[in-house]
Amino acid sequence: MAAQEEFFTGIPKIPYVPSAGAGDVMCFKHYHAEEVLMGKTMEDWLRFSVCYWHSFCGTGADPFGSPTLHRPWNEGTPMEAAKLRLRAAFEFFTKLGVKYYTFHDRDMAPEGSTLEESNRNLDEITDLALELQSQTGIKVLWVTCNLFAHPRYMNGAATNPDCHVLAYAGAQVKKGLDVAKKLGAENFVFWGGREGFLSIYNTDVAAELKHMANFFKMAVQYKEKIGLKCQFLIEPKPKEPCKHQYDYDAMSVIGFLKHYGLESHFKLNIEPNHTTLAGHSYEHDVVMASAFGMLGSVDSNTGSPDLGWDTDQFPMDIRNTTLVMKTIVEQGGLQPGGLNFDAKVRRESTDLEDLFIAHIGAMDAFARGLRHAIRIIEDGLITGMVKERYSSFSHGIGQKVEEGSATLEEMEAFITQKGEPKVTSGKQEKYESIFNHYI
Ligand code: XUL
Ligand code: CO
């Protein structure tokens, strides 16, 4: 196949057609990249990114069946296919109008039989990535190292009981950080799929957590040494592939980072399908991470709450996207993070155009979420009601609690004087009705 060949023939650059009918799914009806809302373009609020592994390496294989997605870029030797895949990906990003992409080291270039060979493969493919980036202006939202697929990592990478394996992971991350610098990645993600345990009987949890923290400290040190400017992110997930993963959810990761003094070097990459696997509602970890000033990026996908595993579906639910965008707008945006579609088309969605339809639908779902969130925020009704609900903390004894200067003796004196508090309605249904008005 010639290098300049088109992979998505017959598909033009996706236009914005707000008047398009319900059946026209190959255009944006809500996402208008350059439209300015609350002082920022939609493109800057949303910072969409396409992920490489699902969209360009995914085959549709599952534990019960063979590949169903036969892609025209999977031809030739692994290195030839890696180059075709990269060209196909850049054609896709350009036609879709997305400025960012994300990848694991091993989905961009095949793993060799030694670290040196893997690194050479990565050098060769990232040379081409750099060329395509400068031709198109498309950038890397984040890079990550795959520290979970190779058999050597079956008992963990940074938490492996054998330091020889931890060292391999360290060497791999060193190269990953070099690649991040070479390609100007804006973030670097750590997702600890094998950092956890399957049996507590054979596991020294305290040792493993300390090793993981020290591993992160080595990464911070090397990042500073090479002058890499990107934001480090940890992606929580409670389970799968491990029975229990240490980065269980946003609060576990925040607690871990603070315990080991790493909180100023990391933020969180929240994936809502992981949040729901942890037993929380869709928006929970986005809200919690943001409350601590640690929401760095979002792996925008969804699960099926009626299933117990990570289905990585494209996010299409407007209520969910509205709640996520409300948090993002309230914190002033996600930069240098973004909304990365860590999502895969279904095994049964076998047409090449399904890749476009999925991304367009999800981008429109987030664009609608953004428009709704901005109406909610600009109207100020819900914000005003919440503010009023906490108004007792703006003066008197409440203000002292707010500032952290109150004592239990003062609480007692206050109650002795004021007696029993009045019950106040939480008005949940009123809030829900008002929220529904905007979507
Ligand atoms: C796994 C997952 C990963 C990370 C990057 O559930 O979400 O793809 O986003 O390793
Ligand atoms: Co993810």
Image (cartoon, grey):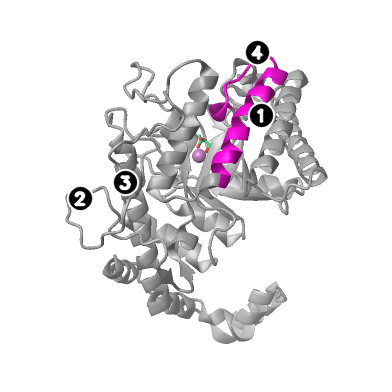
Q: Is residue 412 visible?
A: yes
Report helix, strand or loop for mark 1.
helix
Residue in the foreground of this view, choosing between 53 and 12: 12
Tell me the distance, in whole angstroms, between the alpha carbons under discs 3 and 2: 14 Å
Q: From what the image shows, is residue 393 above or below residue 142?
A: below
> What's the amino acid at mark 1?
Asp
The residue depicted at 47 percent of the width and 27 percent of the height is: 84
Q: Which residue is rendered at x = 63% and y = 16% of the image?
A: 112
User: N-terminal of the two: label 4 or label 1?
Assistant: 4
The disc labelled 4 sits on which kind of residue? Ser
The residue beneath circle 2 is 24
Marks 4 & 1, CB-CB < 8 Å contact: no
* 189 to 164, vertically: above or below: below
CB of mark 2 within 8 Å of CB of mark 4?
A: no
Quadrant for residue 236, please give it: top right
Q: Quadrant of residue 211?
A: top right
Which mark's residue is nearer the viewer, 4 or 1? 1
Q: Which mark is residue 12?
A: 3
Q: Secondary structure at mark 4?
A: loop
- Mark nearer the N terminus (2 vs 4): 2
Numbered circles on residues, count:
4
Front disc: 3 or 1: 3
- Residue 260's spot in the image, x, y percent? 76, 45
- Horizontal relation, residue 90 to residue 168: left or right: left
| Comes first in the chain, label 3 or label 1 | 3
- Give the residues in magenta: 106-134
